[in-house]
Every structure is written in structure tokens, then in C-alpha cells.
Image: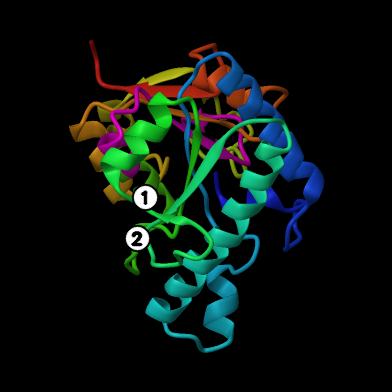
């Protein structure tokens, strides 16, 4: 989930109602026995355009963004714990006084024990997006699908903001997305998913029970996968 999902639309900071809404859906998934690893962005606290206008170097801004994801992850963790859901916040950067370091085998054990694993700090290096982090962690943790919560309700055959006749696609292959030159996520993340056969579900984060439907394989948004 991008950091923008933690704030009201067009605003910055943390919106408690949005965090609670996300936590309630994750609680339902955990209760159903779904193993969940949640990658968090930090765009609600620091956006790329802000850092550019302040003259902050890209690498520095990326490290600041990693710290922002820690704030969001801790907020989500507490909201989940309030539901009685056990969580573990695991970071790719060293902030051991507030969360665990990301260690693959340890993360897998947490998932096996029914804990929601919240992954923060990106990949620990600049120049990698939240999308790439989600793809990398999804592959490492043997996830069956990557669900990408966005501000649109799926993937369209052309930009719906420009073309009124744009049609939402319910199901596509990776090759079809490439052939149509659609921007689903950054190229590194998309290639990782394609080459490692990790399906992607793109859906509207504001949809009613959207995260639950996407994670459980119900029809919502757009499913992108390799042909069977």
C-alpha cells in the first residue's frame, strides 16, 4: 500500500480513520487464516516533488522516505494490535529500538504463526520504489499474489483520465500489459513479478472490502498473470 493510503485524499500526514479501515480488513484476513505480509510506502509524509522543491538529493530523499514508512508501519501495527491481531514490524534499515530487522526466515516463521508482518524501510537502499519492494518481498516470502492498492479501480486499455472510452480490463497477461505499454508499476517491479510468476491484482484501495476481496481471489480490479 502506498503511503497516500494513510492520508485523506490530497492531504498529508496520518488519517486515523484510514489506518483503522485498513487494520479492520487485515484483521478479517488474519481471522480467515490468510498469511499477510504488508509493504508500506511513505508518500503521505514525504513526496518526491516536495524533496525536489527543497533541493534535497534523491538518495537523501529516499532515505527520508524509508523512515516515513517506519512511522506508517508502527501506526498500522498498533491499530491491528487493538483488534487483537499479533503483528511484527520488520525493517530493511536499522531501527532496532522500534522494530525488528528484516530476516527472511524469521519473517516466514511469523507468517506461519498467524502474525501480520508489516514490512518497512523499503529495501534499505535508495532508488527503489515501494512497488519494487513489494515485488521483491513477495517473491522472497513465497507469496501467492501481490495486491496493489491504488487510487484507481484497475488497469485500463488507455489512460481513463484522458480517454472517455477507456475500458477497464478484468484480466490480463504480463505480455499483454507490455505490448500495450501500460504503466501498472515501475519496470523493475513488473519484471520481477513476470519472471518469478507472481500474479498482481490492481484495485481501488477505497473499494468496500477491497483488500479482502483482492487477497482472497475474488473478482475485483485487474488480475495480471502469466498464461497457464
Q: Which residues are magenta?
A: 137-157
Q: Position of residue 170 (x, y in %)?
A: 49, 17
Quadrant of image for the C terminus: top left
Q: Give the left or right position of residue 158, taking residue 128 as reference.
A: right
**Secondary structure beneath label 2:** loop
Residue drawn at x 61%, y 61% as measured from the top left: 71
Q: Are marks 2 and 1 in contact (CB under 8 Å)?
A: yes
Residue 99 vertical placement versus 87 (above, below): below
Q: Which residue is mark 1?
A: 133
Q: Position of residue 47 (x, y in %)?
A: 58, 68
Q: How many marks?
A: 2
Name the one closer to the observer, 65 or 203. Answer: 65
Quadrant of residue 108 in the image? top left
Q: Which residue is mark 2?
A: 128
Disc 1: CA contacts within 10 A as few (<14), some (14-19) or many (>=20):
many
Name the one closer to the observer, 147 or 167. Answer: 147
Quadrant of image for the N terminus: top right
**Secondary structure beneath label 1:** helix
Quadrant of residue 213 in the image? top right
Residue 124 vertical placement versus 184 (above, below): below
Residue 155 included in the magenta stretch of the image: yes
Query: Does residue 114 appear anywhere in the picture?
Result: yes
Residue 92 included in the magenta stretch of the image: no
Name the one closer to the observer, 54 or 161. Answer: 54
Q: Position of residue 33 (x, y in %)?
A: 51, 15
Amino acid at each position: 500500500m502506498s503511503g497516500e493510503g494513510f492520508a485523506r485524499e490530497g492531504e498529508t500526514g496520518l488519517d486515523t480513520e484510514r489506518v483503522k479501515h485498513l487494520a479492520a480488513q487485515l484483521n478479517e484476513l488474519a481471522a480467515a487464516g490468510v498469511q499477510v505480509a504488508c509493504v508500506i510506502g511513505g508518500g503521505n509524509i514525504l513526496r518526491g516533488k516536495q524533496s525536489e522543491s527543497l533541493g534535497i538529493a534523491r538518495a537523501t530523499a529516499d532515505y527520508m522516505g524509508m523512515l516515513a514508512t517506519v512511522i506508517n508501519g508502527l501506526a498500522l501495527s498498533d491499530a491491528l494490535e487493538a483488534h487483537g491481531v499479533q503483528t511484527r514490524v520488520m525493517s530493511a534499515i536499522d531501527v532496532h529500538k522500534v522494530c525488528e530487522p528484516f530476516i527472511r526466515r524469521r519473517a516466514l516463521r511469523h507468517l506461519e504463526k498467524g502474525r501480520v508482518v508489516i514490512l518497512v524501510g523499503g529495501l534499505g537502499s535508495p532508488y527503489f520504489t515501494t512497488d519494487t519492494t513489494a515485488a521483491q518481498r513477495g517473491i522472497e516470502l513465497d507469496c501467492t499474489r501481490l495486491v496493489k492498492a491504488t487510487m484507481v479501480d484497475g488497469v485500463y486499455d488507455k489512460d481513463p483520465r484522458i480517454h472517455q472510452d477507456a475500458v477497464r480490463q478484468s484480466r490480463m497477461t504480463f505480455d499483454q500489459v507490455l505490448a500495450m505499454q501500460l504503466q501498472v508499476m515501475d519496470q523493475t517491479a513488473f519484471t520481477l513479478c513476470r519472471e518469478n510468476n507472481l500474479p498482481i491484482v490492481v484495485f481501488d484501495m477505497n473499494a468496500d472490502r477491497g483488500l479482502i476481496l483482492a487477497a482472497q481471489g475474488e473478482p475485483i480490479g485487474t488480475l495480471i498473470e502469466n498464461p497457464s
